[in-house]
Image (cartoon, rainbow, N blue to C red):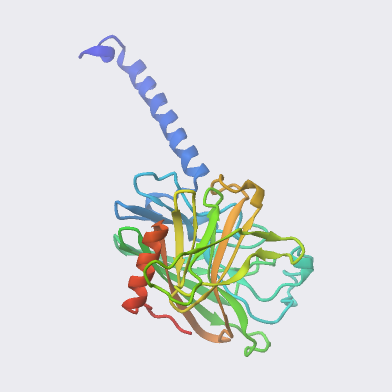
């Protein structure tokens, strides 16, 4: 026995090492809490990027970071309305079933449509996990029963299914499916704007960019940058709906690095930034956040399925745009409807 151990009594050494181990575990736990890093069972990692779903947030996507910098999470999850998640809209508006869970909700002056979301509800209740599996090291699947956002712990007459796959060094492919089984009486021909999906980014990604020109995927075509924010007069995101003729948009930092969203079925993206005076900094638990959502109007089936596919790219604007071109050129639409 040499060194420190040679000079110590074994029980004392064990006690010291246990205390050191406890301190390390506590520090790791605090880091995981601060940056919303899920347990390994809920993470996919290909050595370049890692993506995870958060159990306390309805197993929606709450974590995406470079493998070599796991605390650089780009996804905001300050409340259940954030994350990268499914969110659907339909009548009636307002949605207020006789059971009473949607009464006295202080959201949009109490007027809100049928709106199940993946993470939970306005009270921070979490969606129910029905099944979770990892069929291989690049794929995970979740099936959940979401809650109505603007209600008090009201499960939806529907389920959400998502398949998350790592398909490239910096690319994630997600298939999102709504399985609807509604029994209430409403007009199911009423088309609503749908978020496909809703994406919330952390405040250090403060520049909102896309391509909005008439010559998509041509060389030397410049991207457009928007001063994203929130319009107090219109009570809505600013700039709101923008043209994205290359099917992508992104929030990036001063080095053009960040998160891109691609939906090949959509050329309109909603965008904005909450608490814009705090642009340039902030993590998953901070309230400043970028928002973007490929958007299009759809009437959802009362009983039946609605699916769409999208890609997440973690990288530079050039890398995001390059993959969007590749996906478009090779018609990598997945199983999208619409």
Quadrant containing the N terminus is: top left
Q: Where is residue 53 drawn, in percent x and y?
A: 45, 58
Asked which quadrant contains residue 166, the reply is bottom left
On the picture, is 227 further left or further right than 309? right
Q: Is residue 59 visible?
A: yes
Q: Where is residue 57 drawn, in percent x and y?
A: 54, 57
Q: Spot the residue most to the left.
A: 1
Q: Spot the residue most to the front.
A: 220
Asked which quadrant contains residue 171, the reply is bottom left
- Give above or below for 89 relative to 44: below
Q: Is residue 164 visible?
A: no
- Tell me what residue is drawn at x 49 percent, y 83 percent: 305
- Give above or below for 25 relative to 328: above
On the picture, is 294 further left or further right than 217? right
**Which residue is more in the foreground, 136 or 251?**
251
- Tell me what residue is drawn at x 51 percent, y 71 percent: 212
- Give above or below for 273 relative to 118: above
Q: Where is residue 51 drawn, in percent x and y?
A: 40, 56
**Which residue is more in the foreground, 97 or 255?**
255
Give the total of numbered labels.
Answer: 0
- Tell me what residue is drawn at x 31 percent, y 11 percent: 8
**Which residue is more in the foreground, 271 or 35?**
271
On the picture, is 180 further left or further right than 90? left
């Amino acid at each position: 026995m040499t060194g420190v151990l040679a000079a110590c009594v074994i029980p004392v050494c064990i006690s010291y090492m246990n205390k050191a181990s406890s301190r390390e575990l506590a520090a790791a736990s605090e880091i995981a809490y601060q940056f919303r890093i899920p347990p390994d069972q809920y993470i996919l990692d290909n050595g370049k990027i890692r993506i995870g779903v958060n159990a306390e947030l309805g197993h929606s996507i709450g974590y995406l970071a470079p493998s070599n910098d796991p605390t650089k999470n780009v996804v905001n999850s300050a409340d259940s309305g954030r994350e990268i998640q499914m969110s659907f809209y339909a009548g009636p508006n307002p949605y207020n079933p006789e059971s009473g869970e949607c009464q006295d909700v202080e959201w949009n002056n109490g007027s809100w449509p049928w709106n199940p979301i993946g993470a939970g509800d306005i009270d921070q209740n979490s969606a129910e996990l029905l099944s979770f599996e990892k069929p291989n090291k690049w794929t995970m699947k979740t099936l959940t029963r979401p809650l109505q956002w603007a209600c008090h712990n009201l499960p939806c007459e529907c389920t959400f299914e998502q398949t998350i796959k790592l398909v490239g060094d910096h690319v994630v492919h997600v298939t999102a499916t709504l399985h609807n089984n509604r029994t209430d009486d409403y007009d199911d021909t009423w088309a609503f704007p749908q978020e496909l999906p809703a994406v919330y980014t952390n405040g250090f990604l403060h520049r909102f960019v896309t391509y909005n020109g008439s010559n998509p995927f041509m060389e030397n075509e410049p991207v457009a940058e928007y001063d994203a924010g929130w319009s107090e007069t219109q009570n809505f995101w600013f700039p709101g709906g923008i043209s994205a003729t290359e099917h992508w948009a992104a929030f990036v930092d001063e080095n053009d690095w960040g998160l891109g969203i691609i939906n090949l079925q959509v050329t309109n993206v909603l965008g904005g930034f909450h608490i814009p005076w705090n642009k340039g900094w902030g993590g998953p638990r901070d309230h400043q956040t970028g928002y973007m959502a490929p958007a299009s109007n759809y009437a959802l089936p009362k009983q039946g399925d609605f699916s769409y596919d999208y890609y997440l790219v973690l990288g530079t604007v050039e890398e995001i745009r390059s993959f969007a071109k590749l996906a478009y050129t090779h018609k990598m639409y997945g199983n999208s409807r619409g």
